[in-house]
Image: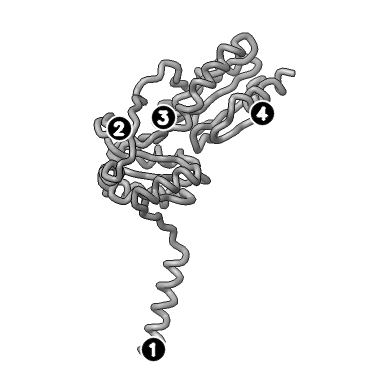
């Protein structure tokens, strides 16, 4: 009887372990190598004051203490590896677990945090992601007006904290000027336009959606080059 109970326990334990997802902890050297070899989303979960002292280049920034932290990390592309870090590794470990629970495909935590990164001699960059004069808040009513007044509408569903969004922003703004008389182009702040996000089932950022005569005709989630997006627009205009 004892033997049967023990074997049963092992089977249950193995079953739980094999079905559960987890995250990896890497020291700075290996963390840096992974970032360089395998493109993904770098996520800084420190406070804005901490971020202002320097961050890993191209990092998205979501304060772990933000009351909407879970909602925001849920908008990260699920098919991308997330490289998460904080000051010393405590908050990022908790964030890594939350990312796993949110369905993230692969999560890697920086062991020792940004303190260990700096001790290893790796550089930090500075970036202010608190200002963006072209990102807009839309209600459903406001957006319906845009759709009704324009034949072709391109929307970049975007957030301030998302590094891929920030990378694409200058390109989207340039296209807005290039196609001023042909296509209505807007960048929508997803964090402030929740009802619109629900209406169009936007689950990750950046997401680009093209409308014609009020109907969605094309959608892409993730980074696109200017050339790729121009091809999409020209195909529709022609």
Ranked by sequence position, the earlier of labels 3 and 2 is: 2
Q: CA distance from mark 2 to mark 1?
A: 57 Å
Quadrant of residue 146 in the image?
top right
Q: Secondary structure at mark 4?
A: strand
Please tell me how crowded label 4 is: few (under 14), some (14-19), or many (20+) other residues with Cα within 10 Å.
few
Q: Which residue is mark 1?
A: 3
Contact between labelled residues 2 and 3, with CB atoms less than 8 Å apart: no
How far is the residue under mark 3 from the one under mark 2?
24 Å
Question: In this rendering, which labeled residue sits more in front, label 2 or label 1?
Answer: 2
Q: Secondary structure at mark 3?
A: helix
Q: Which mark is residue 54?
A: 2
Q: Residues within 10 Å of mark 1 (few under 14, many from 20)?
A: few
Depth check, mark 3 against mark 2: the one in front is 2
Q: Is residue 2 left or right of residue 144?
A: left
Q: Earlier in the sequence, mark 1 or mark 3?
A: 1
Establish if 227 lies above or below 112.
above
Q: Classify mark 2: helix, strand or loop.
A: loop
Q: Sequence-wise, which precedes: disc 2 or disc 4? A: 2
Q: Which residue is mark 4?
A: 217
Pointer 3 residue: 191
Q: Quick one: label 3 or label 4, which is nearer the N terminus? A: 3
Q: Quadrant of residue 115?
A: top left
Numbered disc 1: secondary structure? helix
- Return the residue found at the far bottom: 1
Compute the Cα span from label 3 to label 4: 24 Å
């Amino acid at each position: 009887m004892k033997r049967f109970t023990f074997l049963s326990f092992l089977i249950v334990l193995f079953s739980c372990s094999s079905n559960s997802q987890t995250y990896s902890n890497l020291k700075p050297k290996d963390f840096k190598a992974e970032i360089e070899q395998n493109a993904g989303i770098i996520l800084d979960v420190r406070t804005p004051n901490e971020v202002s002292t320097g961050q890993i280049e191209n990092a998205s920034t979501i304060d772990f203490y933000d009351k909407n932290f879970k909602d925001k990390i849920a908008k990260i592309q699920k098919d991308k590896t997330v490289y998460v870090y904080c000051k010393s590794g405590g908050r990022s470990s908790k964030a890594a677990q939350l990312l796993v629970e949110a369905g993230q495909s692969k999560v890697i935590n920086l062991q020792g945090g940004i303190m260990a990164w700096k001790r290893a001699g790796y550089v930090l960059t500075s970036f202010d992601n608190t200002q963006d004069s072209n990102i807009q808040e839309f209600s459903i009513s406001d957006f319906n007006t845009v759709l009704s007044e324009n034949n072709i509408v391109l929307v970049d569903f975007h957030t301030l904290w998302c590094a891929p969004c920030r990378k694409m922003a200058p390109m989207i703004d340039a296209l807005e000027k290039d196609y001023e008389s042909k296509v209505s182009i807007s960048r929508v702040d997803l964090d402030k336009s929740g009802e619109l996000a629900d209406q169009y089932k936007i689950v990750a950022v950046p997401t680009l959606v093209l409308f014609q005569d009020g109907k969605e005709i094309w959608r892409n989630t993730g980074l696109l080059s200017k050339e790729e997006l121009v091809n999409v627009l020209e195909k529709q205009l022609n």
